[in-house]
Image (cartoon, rainbow, N blue to C red):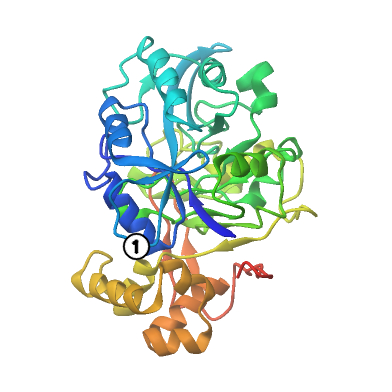
Amino acid sequence: MRLIADLHIHSGYSRATSKEMNLPTIARWARLKGIDVVGTGDFTHPAHFASIKELLEPSAPGLFRLRKEAKDARPVHFMLTAEVSSIWTQGGRTRKVHTLVFAPDMKTVERINKTLASIGNIASDGRPILGLSAYELAGIVFDASAEAMVVPAHAWTPWFSIFGSKSGFDSIEECFGDLSRHIFAIETGLSSNPAMNRRLSSLDRITLISNSDAHSPAKLGREANVFDANLDYYEIRRIMKERDTKHFPYTIEFYPEEGKYHCDGHRECGVLFTPQETKRAKGVCPVCGRGVTVGVLSRVEALADRPENYIAPDAPPTVHLVPLEEILAQAFECGVNTKKVKHEYERLIAEGGSEFDILLWKTDDELSSLAGKRIAEGILRARNGNISIVPGFDGEFGKINIYGRTEAPHPARPVQGSLL
């Protein structure tokens, strides 16, 4: 069966996160988006973990659902997930790496939390900041359960990731040492996509997953994974570990240019650089003389041993999308958070199914009948790559223009087969 999974989100206990990010609201929005399996987020936080134990019950092997849910509601299943921020010194440098942890059961979470609580204050933030290495964290997680998973989060983000330009490493092995054999997946992050990651032959054995890292309900599903699998934590883990592309046929992606660390630059001075421009400027902002923030595109270029146009022969396709609310806002020429966009979004979901149903699978005629010609055109442009983007840089999201483009700068790789 087809499962859409978003496995990296946060609760209201994380900094800069909406207080609406509680389990019932997450389930409701996952249903609107068309997500079948969603992370709980933040299981390390004592209060959030208490709500997980109170509100969820087992629904499938290693998965959970709300105890009190409407009988006619499409079920949404939760996976026990968390993100940990590690800050430590290694090789004479300060390292800052965010790591995702997936657990198969409550007992495993309790064991992980008990150990982490002895190291630092896990109640201070939903994503705790701890003075332990990613290697030490992985050891704690695997000691708690051999079935748990450790996945480097948003692997290329400059400031807090395994490959980040500011505080990261050049390889998984450099970060995780002899535990690298147990690291079989990384999260690509919003500012990169699988094709960029496949330029590194060192990642050939690694499964590339994509998640929203949502800090508010509406951001759920902006990236996600599509599995052909049963509702089963252990089967999903096996698929990821074995890099089983038959049962992990594609990911749903942000256009990476829209990510806020795609290119290099200095936001305060309005300086946006390509990797080539950064080299010519020797990494220095021409306005203020300080160093620019080196983004994902440059960092991939620095580590890649394959050309920019490399296509892995066994790589599953990817689908790049623009969230429906962004399309509506551009169609109406108004803000994403306006009542007009909200009302039309709710109508489209009520009449057309989930957001993924509309963005991925409605035909041209179905879209026109449901949404009208202009919105249908916007959805098809986003689906087919007929858009233009001013890239994101130094913490600023890229700016998409849907209706001003007539030819595709981002040729889509169509997804074929019964999963559609």
Q: Is residue 279 visible in this depiction of the protein?
A: no
Image spot of residue 398 (x, y percent)? 43, 57
Image spot of residue 170 (x, y percent)? 64, 28
Image spot of residue 81 (x, y percent)? 44, 36
Q: Is residue 3 visible in this depiction of the protein?
A: yes
Query: How many badges with numbers are in the image?
Result: 1
Residue at x 56%, y 36% (from the top left corner): 282
Is residue 372 rendered to the left or right of residue 158? left
Residue at x 60%, y 24% (from the top left corner): 146
Residue on which disc 1 sits = 73
Q: Quadrant of the N terminus?
A: bottom right
Residue type, label 1: Ala
Query: Residue 316, located in which quarter of the rendered image?
Result: bottom right
Q: Is residue 97 above or below residue 374?
A: above
Is residue 137 rendered to the left or right of residue 245? left
* Residue farthest to the left, as pictured: 339
Is residue 24 rendered to the left or right of residue 375? left
Q: Please state which of residues 29 and 78 is positioned toward the viewer in this rendering.
A: 78
Residue at x 55%, y 16% (from the top left corner): 143
Q: Is residue 210 above or below residue 411?
A: above
